[in-house]
Amino acid sequence: MTLQSVLEDIQKRPGTGDLIPIIDPVSEEQIGEFTDCGPEFVDEAVARAKSSFEAGVWSGMPGRERAKILWRIADLIDEHAADFAAIDSANTGMMKRQSELVVPTCAEFFRYYAGWCSKINGTAYDIRTSGIASDAYVDQHGYTLREPYGVVGLIFPWNGPIFNACAKIAPALAAGCSSLVKPAEETPLSALLLDRLIHEAGVPEGVINLITGYGHTAGAAITAHPDVEKVAFTGSTEVGKEIVKASAGNLKKVMLELGGKSPVLIFDDADLDKAIFGAAMGIFIHSGQGCVCGSRIFVQRGVYEQVVEGIAGVANFMKYGGPEEEGVMSGPLISAKQLGRVLSFIDEGRSDGVEIVAGGYRLDRKGYFVHPTVLTNVDPGMRLYQQEIFGPVVSILPFDTEDEAVAMANDTSYGLAATAWTTNVSRAHRIVKRLQAGSVQVNCQLVFDHDLPFGGYKQSGWGQEFGREGLDAYLKNKSIIVQL
Ligand code: NAD
C-alpha cells in the first residue's frame, strides 16, 4: 500500500463533517484530504466495538491464539516497513533514516505484547476469615482475575504517527480489548495501512475501529461516550485536562502520556564531547517535536561556556531538510500553526532580553523549518522556560552545586523525563532519586525499551505505557472469594 493508495483510501472514509486537508510540511502543499468523521460515525464505531467485545470474538479467544495474530501483525509491519517509512516521512517531513529506524520498533511492540497474551493471570490467596456475619473462622479460597477493560479509546498525536499507534494498539489487543483508534488529524495516513494489516493478520471485524477526524469533534466524541470504558491518550497537557473533564460522565478510566519540559544536567566531570552531542541531539532531532526532548539544559559553571559553544556549534552544523534531501539530520515542524507557535516563543524571548546564541529564525526556504535555536540569559519566570515549545529551541542556564541543579531541574509543572551527564557514579545514583520525572537517563538520551515502563510524573501524565505496566493499563483486577 503506497502513499498514493492511502491518500485515495482516506478520501473514501465515512464522514459527515468538514474536509480536513493533509499538508506536506516540506513543500507546504496539500497532498490530500479527508472528511471529519463526526460523532455519528463514532457512535457506530463504538457500537461495533461493544458488540465485538461482548461476542467474545477477540476477548474470548485463547491468549495463545491472540499471540499468533499479534506476531503476524509484527511480521506484516516488517514486510511493509518501506511503505510505513515513506508514508510517515511524506506526512510529517521526518527524515527518511529516522522513519526507517522507527518501523522495526513498531513491529516489536506486537512481538513484545504477543508474549504477554498467554500470561494474563491473577493471583491466588489462601484466606481464613469470619466475614462480618459470624465469629467462626472458615477456610476460603481467594483469587484475582485480570479482565480486559472492554471498549477503549486510543488517541494519539502527530509527532510519531506509526510509533504512537503501535504503542497503544499492541497492549490493548494483547489484553483483549476492542478499540477506537484515533490518529492526529495532521497525520492519519500510516494508521490506514496499519488498520489494513491488522485485519489481514486475522483480528476480527469490530475489534479495531479507525476514527479519522479532528480532536474537538471525533476525539471529543470518544472521550464523552458512555460505552467507552477507558481512554488512553498521548498528547498535550492542555488536551489531557479536557479529556479528564469529558470522561467524568461515566467516570471512565484515563491514561495520559502528556507533555514535558525535560531538564538535562551536565556536570563538570561529564564526558563533555558525548554530553554536548547527546544534549544537542536530545533537543534538535525531529525539530524538537519529541515529548522527552531536553529543552532546558543546566551546566555546571566551570564548563558552561564550553557547553554553550559546543551545542551552538551542533545547531549551526545540522542540516535541516525534507526526507528526500541528502545529508539531512532533521525535518520540519509539522504545520504552519506549530511554526507560528515556535517563532512566537522565540520573538517573545528576544523582546524579553534573552541572548540568541544560535538560530532564532525561520529557514529561508520552503517548508516549516526553524533553525535550531540556543538561548542563554533566560529567566526561569519566562513563558519560554516554563511552557513546552515542541520545537528546536533550548534554554541553557549555569549552576554551581548539585543541590542547585536539582532544584532548577524540578522547578516545572512537568515531570516526563530528565537526564544527568556525569562520570561520578555516586552522584548519578543520588541525582536519579531526586529528579521529579517518570523517566531518568544517565549519560544517554532518547533511549527506550519495550520492556521498561514509561510515563510522566506531575502534569506529564497518569499511568505508564510499555512493559508489563503497559499491559496492566488495559486490564481490570477482580477479586473473588469462594467459601470452602
Ligand atoms: P494534542 O493534544 O493537540 O492532540 C493529540 C491528539 O488528541 C490528536 O489526535 C488530537 O486530534 C486529539 N484531540 C485534540 N483535542 C481533543 C479533545 N478535545 N478530545 C479528544 N481528543 C482530542 O497534541 P499534539 O499537538 O498533536 O501533540 C503534541 C503533544 O503530544 C506534546 O505536548 C507532546 O509532549 C505530547 N506527546 C507526549 C508523549 C508522551 O509519551 N508523554 C509522546 C508524544 C507526544
Image: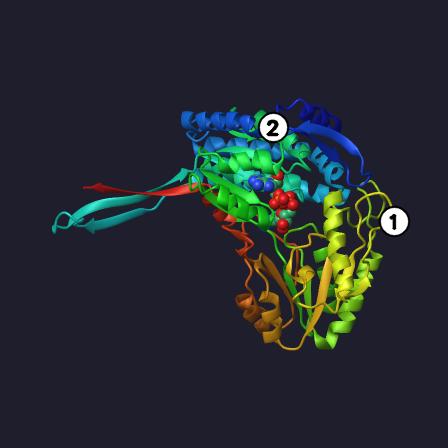
* Looking at the image, residue 30 lies above or below residue 391: above
Hey, which quadrant is residue 299 in on the image? bottom right
Q: Residue at x 55, y 43 (%)?
A: 233
Q: Is mark 2 within 8 Å of ligand 1?
A: no
Looking at the image, residue 136 sits to the left or right of residue 164; the answer is left
How is the protein colored in the picture?
rainbow
* Residue 132 on image: x %, y %: 17, 49
Hey, which quadrant is residue 304 in on the image? bottom right
* Looking at the image, residue 53 lies above or below residue 116: above
Q: Is residue 1 shown to the viewer in this render?
A: no
Q: Residue at x 58, y 75 (%)?
A: 403
* Residue 216 on image: x %, y %: 59, 38
Instruction: State which quarter of the image contains the C terminus.
Output: top left
Instruction: State which quarter of the image contains the N terminus.
Output: top right
Q: Residues within 10 Å of mark 2 (few under 14, many from 20)?
A: many
Q: Amino acid at mark 1?
A: Asp
**Of pointers 1 and 2, the one earlier in the residue sequence:** 2
* Residue 322 on image: x %, y %: 81, 43
Mark 1 residue element? loop
Mark 2 residue element? loop
Q: Amino acid at mark 2?
A: Cys
* Looking at the image, residue 212 lies above or below residue 12: below
Q: Which residue is mark 2?
A: 37
Label drawn at residue 437 = none
Q: Residue at x 59, y 73 (%)?
A: 427
Q: Which residue is mark 1?
A: 364
Q: Nearer the viewer, residue 189 or 15?
A: 15
How far apart in space, not on screen, are marks 1 and 2 (Cα)?
37 Å
Looking at the image, residue 150 sits to the left or right of residue 442; the answer is left
